[in-house]
Image (cartoon, helix red, strand yellow):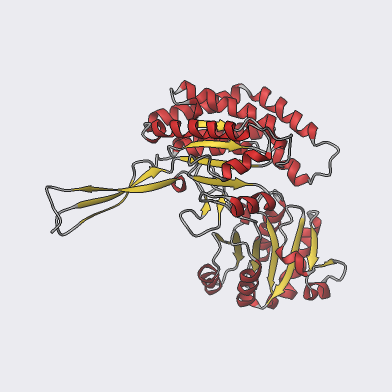
Amino acid sequence: MLDTVAPSPDIDVLMNDIGRKAKAAARPLSFASTEIKNRALNAMADAILANKAQILAENAKDLQDIEGTETLASFVDRLTLNDKRVAEMAEGLRAIAALADPVGEVIAAWDRPNGLKIERVRTPLGVIGVIFESRPNVTADAGALCLKAGNSVILRCGSDSRRSSQAIHACLVEGLKAAGLPEHAIQLVPVTDRAAVGAMLRGLDGAIDVIVPRGGKSLVARVQNEARVPVFAHLEGLCHIYVDGSADIEMAKKIVVNAKMRRTGICGAAETLLVDGAAIGTHLTPLLEVLTDAGCEVRASPTVLKVAPGLKPANEEDWSTEYLDAIISVAVVDGISGAIAHIQKYSSNHTEAVIAEDPDVVARFFTEVDSAILLHNASTQFADGGEFGMGAEIGIATGKMHARGPVGVEQLTSFKYRVHGAGQTRP
């Protein structure tokens, strides 16, 4: 959550100073060697493991602050750190260090008839602003990805994860210093004043090149509505699974439960299950049973209610609700055509999955569904940069300009052209 302490009259002064420092740090980062960046990332991982007790102690204080509040279990899960998650954070930093450095990569090259040799080369974006809410691990993921891509970053966490994020950020700064990189390359906004978000959205006097929001619908909507700089974001994760009549039912049961229940609070969790009308007699009841046995509340369409009258009826709002909880909407559709029509009407264009053995069904799904991530016979919970081999992600983008899907190191770069001549002049 982002509402917090009383605003400071000096917030613009503070934030603009942060922006100037980030911009100054971005220049040496843009041409820092791969070896130096990797040295910093590995030193950050070492620092996180060495300071695990402090990180967990600060996280316990963050969790204590929300005790007794009406907080969703999924929100608590996103906020919670433990030994395993701290270890995974460090592993993520090392995985990013192991990635190929995108900066300086020649994306394309060609020769012109006049002898000019042209190259398109990856370059850093500059300064990236990341605004996030309850997930303290975003501090490490975002800081590391931006660094690897040669960018400086300004991180603005929510009040709920403030202590955890500060403890993690201290480890990142330790890694920067160990590698001789500017400590202002990764900055954490030191106040929880909402005005700090507004200042970032205005671009900090031209310092910020792109904003990445990670959080709830209200945060992302505000960023998309108010930002004066480009935004990489998704508003909601209204993810669908379509189970075709050709699907292997045992595979379908396993995938559906995982997609919904593995972690209900992440943006890749399935929110709607669509079942082929031709498979009502074979697939629908087993899928409903496995969901309810897993503790998931099912909100059913009228056709589904005829098969399982004890379920809660779904209303129109359910089809466009990102539950982030152990709740799923279930409808029967008229085959792949019905599934595509439903997804086109309600999807947020984040992630959709088809479970089918019929190659024609899969081909239509992949061709006609226009979401950022499409899966065949796999859980929607694979919608994650780490699972894509990107080391981690700074977020999921559902727009169609520049970045789409998991935003990793390559997506955090732009490009420039290098043109080599031998004395050519234009006639």
Provide residue 246's location: percent of width, then percent of height.
62, 72
The quadrant the C terminus occupies is bottom left
Provide residue 102's location: percent of width, then percent of height.
39, 42
- Please say if 88 is above or below 317: above
> What residue is shown at x 61% (from left), y 31% (from top)?
87
Considering depth in this image, is 143 or 97 the residue closer to the camera?
Answer: 143
The quadrant the N terminus occupies is top right
Provide residue 59's location: percent of width, then percent of height.
71, 30
- Please say if 50 is above or below 135: above
- Please say if 286 is above or below 131: below
Taking the view exactly as shown, the residue that stands out farthest to the front is 9
Provide residue 140's location: percent of width, then percent of height.
57, 34
- Is any atom of residue 185 visible in this view? no
Q: How many marks?
A: 0
- Lateral position of residue 427 relative to residue 16, left or right: left
- Is any atom of residue 225 visible in this view? yes
> What residue is shown at x 68% (from left), y 58% (from top)?
270
> What residue is shown at x 50% (from left), y 33% (from top)?
94
- Please say if 158 is above or below 166: below
Considering depth in this image, is 214 or 9 the residue closer to the camera?
Answer: 9
Considering depth in this image, is 20 or 210 the residue closer to the camera?
Answer: 20
- Lateral position of residue 359 relative to residue 315, left or right: left
